[in-house]
Image: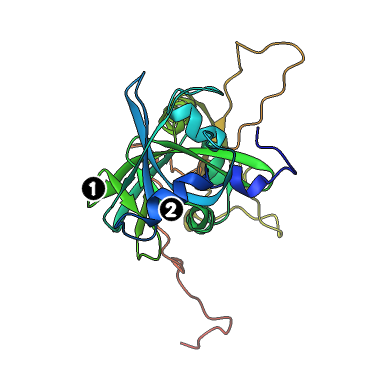
Amino acid sequence: MMPGNERQEIENGGKIIMPASALDSLTRLNIEYPMLFKLTNLKDSRHTHAGVLEFVAEEGKCYLPYWMMVNLFLIEGDILAIENVSLPVAKVSKFQPFSVDFLDITNPKAVLENALRNFACLTTGDIIAIKYNKKVYELRVLETKPGDAVSIIECDMNVDFEAPVGYKEKVEEKKTDEASQDHVMEEVIETFKGAGVRLDGKKKKENQLDTKGVKKVKARGVPDYDYKFGQLTFDRSVKPISDRVVENDSNPVPTNDGFQGQGCSMKKLRK
C-alpha cells in the first residue's frame, strides 16, 4: 500500500514506517534508543511490538508488514495506537512452525537467526512470517524471556523450537503403519532335503548318516485387501529376518562339533 517502488525487505521484517511528525515529537522527549513501539488495536484489544525503519510515511499514516496487521486484526485504514516503550534484552525465545515443511530446511536455526536480523523485538503469542527460497514460513512465538516482549537488537539469544503443527499426527500414522506390518505369515524353507551317497558305492557308516538340515524362516507378505485399482503404494519399512532352527525331540539338531569320526591308518600294522 505504500507509494513508490515495491520494497520486499519491509514485508520480510518486523519494523514499521512512521510519518516525520512522529520523529519530531520523539526527539523532544527523553526516550531510550533504539526506538521500540507498542502497537495496539483498541477496538479488538490486540497488541504487538515493533521497531521503526524510516520516518517517511505520509502525515497520519503508518505502514506495517502484512503479517503484523493479521496479528492485530487490522485492515487498511483502521485506527492504530502507537506508544514508545522500553523492552528488556532477550535471552531465550521459543518458536513453533506452522508447517512440517520447515523441517526440510537443512539448518532451520541458522535460517531463523538470519531472518530475525530484520526484526527489532518479539512478542509472545505473535505469528511471524519469514521468507526462505521463495517460500513463506509462519512461526508462532511460544515463549520469550525475561518478559512477554523483548528486544532482540544486538543480543545473545538462545533459540529453541517446538515440534511443528501436524508433526505428531505424522508420527502416529507411521506407528500405525508399522503395527499393521507385524501380522505377517512365515514360510519355512528346508535346505538340503536329498540323501547323500558315497562315490565308491558302499553303504555309509553309522557316523556318516544324514542329519536333518537347518530350517530357515522366511517372512511372507500379507495381501493388501484395501487395494484400489490404479493406486501404487511403496512400503519402505524394512525388518530383519532372523534365522531360526526347528528343534524336534525325536531328531535333535546336532551341534557343530567337527571331526567326530574315528581315524584309521592306510598302512596295515604287522602283528
| Residue 214 visible | no
Rate crowding at label 2 as few (under 14), some (14 to 19) or many (20 or more) other CA atoms within 10 Å. many
| Residue 39 visible | yes
Q: Nearer the viewer, residue 88 or 172?
A: 88
Mark identifier at residue 35: none
Q: Nearer the viewer, residue 174 or 265?
A: 174
Q: Which residue is mark 1?
A: 147
The residue furthest bottom is 270
Residue 5 vs residue 42: left or right?
right
Residue at 54% of width from left, 34% of height from top?
A: 61
Q: Nearer the viewer, residue 227 or 270?
A: 227
Q: Position of residue 58 (x, y in %)?
A: 59, 38
Mark nearest the camera among 1 and 2 is 2
* C-alpha gap between disc 1 and disc 2: 15 Å
Q: Amino acid at mark 1?
A: Gly
Q: Which residue is mark 2?
A: 120
First of labels 1, 2 by sequence position: 2
Q: Amino acid at mark 2?
A: Ala
Q: Position of residue 174 (x, y in %)?
A: 47, 31
Secondary structure at badge 2 equals loop
Q: Where is residue 111, by image quadrant?
A: bottom right
Residue at 45% of width from left, 33% of height from top?
A: 167
Q: Quadrant of the N terminus?
A: top right
**In the depicted structure, whether residue 41 falls above or below residue 121:** above
Residue 155 vs residue 136: left or right?
left
Q: Position of residue 227 (x, y in %)?
A: 65, 13
Q: Nearer the viewer, residue 16 or 218?
A: 16
